[in-house]
Amino acid sequence: MAAQFVTPFRKGGRTKNDRADAEAIATAARQGNMRFVPVKDIDQQVRLSWHRVREGYKAESLAIGNRLRGLLAEFGVIVAPSDRALCRLRADLDGQPGLPAELRELLRDLAGHWKRLCLHLDACDARIEAHAREDERCVQLRAVTGIGPITADAAVAMVGNAREFKQGRQMAAWLGLVPTQHSSGGHVHLGEISCRGDAYLRTLLIQGARSSLQRAKVGAPEKATPDVRQGDRGHRQQTRTTNLGDAGARGGLRSARLPQPSHAPGKPYSQRRVATGFSFHRQREVVNNGSGRPRENLTNQMDVQTA
C-alpha cells in the first residue's frame, strides 16, 4: 500500500512509532476500496539499478564538465558547452600558452576523471540497450514513435505487469501525467499535472513526446508515421480552433494575436476561404459579437488562418 493511504488511519496525529504504523496498516488493509502496489521482483530491481547508476554518472559528468569550463574561463579560455569541445581541449591542453603548469596538471587529472565517467555512462547505455533488445515487451514499446531503448527498458522495469492497471488512464494517473482536480458543486476545476509517481519515467516519456512533436514539425508529411501524422494534425486543428474560439468568447479578436491577412482588402467576402472548423455562419456570429469596431476590420482578422 502507498504510504499516503495509510497515514489517515494512524492514531495519535503526529505521533509515529512502529506500533501505531502496524495498527494503521492493519486497519487500512481491511478497507474495501484500498489500492495495493505490487512488489517488484529481483529482475526489475536489477534493471532499475542500471538506470539509477546511469543517472548518477550523467549528473556527475555534467558537473565536472561545467567545473572544467569554469576553471578555464577564469584564465581566459572559453570552451563551448559540448562534450566534443571538452575532448578537443583535453587533447590540446598543453597547447594553451596562458595556463600555468600547476593548473594544467590539475585540469589534466580532472579531465581524465571526466573521461572515465563518460566511458562508464556509455557502458550503462550499452547494457540498458542490450536489456531492451532481448525483452519482447521492450521491442513492442520501441515501435512507438518517441520511445527508445532507455525509455522502453525503464517502463518495463518500473511497471512490470501492465495488467495491474484496468486502463491506460490509470497508468497515466500513476505516472502523474493527469491534471489535478479541485472541483466542487458540479463545477470542474482542473489544474496542472499532478507530477506524482516516479519522476524518472515521467521525464523520459515527456521528453519522448516533445521529440516526436519536433520531428513532426520539421519532417516531411509524406514520410511521417501514422501516429505522428495523426498527432500533428490534431495538434494543429486544436490550436487553430482554440485561438479563434477563445477570441470570439471574449467578445473580440484582439487577443488572438493573428497576423495581418495576405489577401487584397477589396476581395469579395463570398470568395474568401474560411478557417478550418468555422463556417460562414460561425464567422458572421463571431464578427457580430465583436467589440464594436468596423465590420471589415474584424473580418480581415478572421481570414488570416484560412487555407
Image: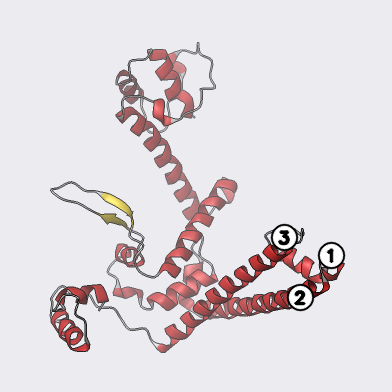
Q: Which is closer to the viewer, label 3 or label 2?
A: 3
Q: Give how far across and how far down residue 42 sits, in percent.
A: 42, 89
What's the residue type where badge 1 is placed? Gln
Quick check: 163 left or right of 255?
left
Residue 178 appears in the rendering: yes
- Viewer-side residue, 208 vs 222: 208
Q: Which residue is mark 1?
A: 96
Q: Look at the numbered discs 1 and 3 and tell me whether their residues touch, using CB distance below 8 Å.
A: no
Disc 3 crowd, CA 10 A, few/some/many (<14, 14-19, 20+):
few
The answer to whether the residue labelled 1 contacts the one labelled 2, judged by CB atoms less than 8 Å apart, is no
Would residue 293 appear left or right of 67 to someone viewing this image?
Answer: left
Identity of the residue drawn at 41% across and 19% down: 299
14 or 164: which is nearer to us? 14
Whichever of labels 1 and 3 marks the residue nearer the N terminus, that label is: 3
Q: Residue at x 14, y 78 (%)?
A: 12
Quadrant of residue 40 in the image? bottom left
The structure residue drawn at horizontal position 13% and vertical position 48%, both measured from the top left corner, is: 185
**Disc 2 secondary structure class:** helix
Viewer-closest of 202 and 96: 96
Image mark for residue 226 = none
Q: Position of residue 263 (x, y in %)?
A: 53, 19
User: Mark 3 to mark 2: distance in Å?
Assistant: 16 Å
Q: Nearer the viewer, residue 22 or 243?
A: 22
Instruction: Look at the image and name its color scheme.
Output: secondary structure
Q: How many marks?
A: 3
- Identity, as a three-letter code, of the amino acid under mark 3: Ala
Q: Which residue is mark 2?
A: 108
- Residue named by callout 3: 73
Image spot of residue 127 (x, y percent)? 58, 81
Q: CA distance from mark 1 to mark 2?
A: 12 Å
